[in-house]
Amino acid sequence: MSFLWHLNNNLKIADTKLDVAEVRSKADKAGRRAAASMESVERLTLVLRAMWELLSENTTLTEADLEARVKSIDLRDGRLDAKYRPEMKPFVCRSCGNMVHPSRTHCQFCGAEIVDGADPFNKVQAP
Ligand SMILES: [Zn+2]
């Protein structure tokens, strides 16, 4: 009886150790994803700050103009929620005229580099 009780407890302890290892692994992965997201946000913030400084120094645009445009873009999806959700519409390749998926960097038909459809924020890379 005592042997079986100890055996059962040892099996439960082993299962618990496996569960803890799995939870640690998932937490580590979530932490790495969160760190990558923060790096992306920091890059975007850097580009936005540079763009705003260039605009405000070289034009007559004001912060009120900026706030109005932010609100206008925010409302494009019908909701004022401080989020940007662009539609994923295909666009026309300037080289061959075929439709190209917006996620592509090159036309899948002629191989031309997609410049106009590329998101400039994606061109900034960590040094
Ligand atoms: Zn093309």
Image (spheres, rainbow, N blue to C red):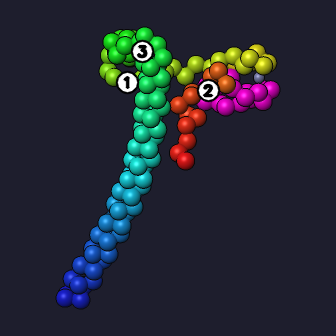
Secondary element at image label 1: loop
Residue stretch in magenta? 100-114
95 part of magenta stretch? no
Q: Counting other residues with Cα less than 10 Å from the Cα at mark 1, is it few (<14), some (14-19), or many (20 or more)?
A: few
> Label 3 belongs to which residue?
73
Q: Quadrant of residue 104?
A: top right
First in residue order: circle 1 vs circle 3 = 3
Queried whether the magenta region covers residue 103, the answer comes back as yes
Label pair 2/1, CB-CB below 8 angstroms: no
Query: Between disc 2 and disc 1, whose residue precedes?
Result: 1
Task: Determine whether, in the image, residue 5 is placed left or right of residue 109.
Answer: left
Q: Earlier in the sequence, mark 2 or mark 3?
A: 3
Q: Position of residue 108 (x, y in %)?
A: 74, 29
Residue 83's disc is 1
Amino acid carrying label 1: it is Lys
Residue visible at 65% across and 21% down in the picture: 116
Identify which residue, 25 or 83, lies in the foreground. Answer: 83
In the image, the residue with mark 1 has its CB under 8 Å from the nearest atom of ligand 1: no
The image's mark for residue 107 is none
Per the image, label 3 sits on a secondary structure element best described as helix
Q: Quadrant of the N terminus?
A: bottom left
Residue identified by numbered label 2: 118
Q: Left or right of 15: which side holds 118?
A: right
Q: Answer left or right for 120 relative to 48.
A: right
Q: Please report the residue visible at 42 percent of the width from the left and 18 percent of the height from the top.
A: 56
Q: Secondary structure at mark 2?
A: loop
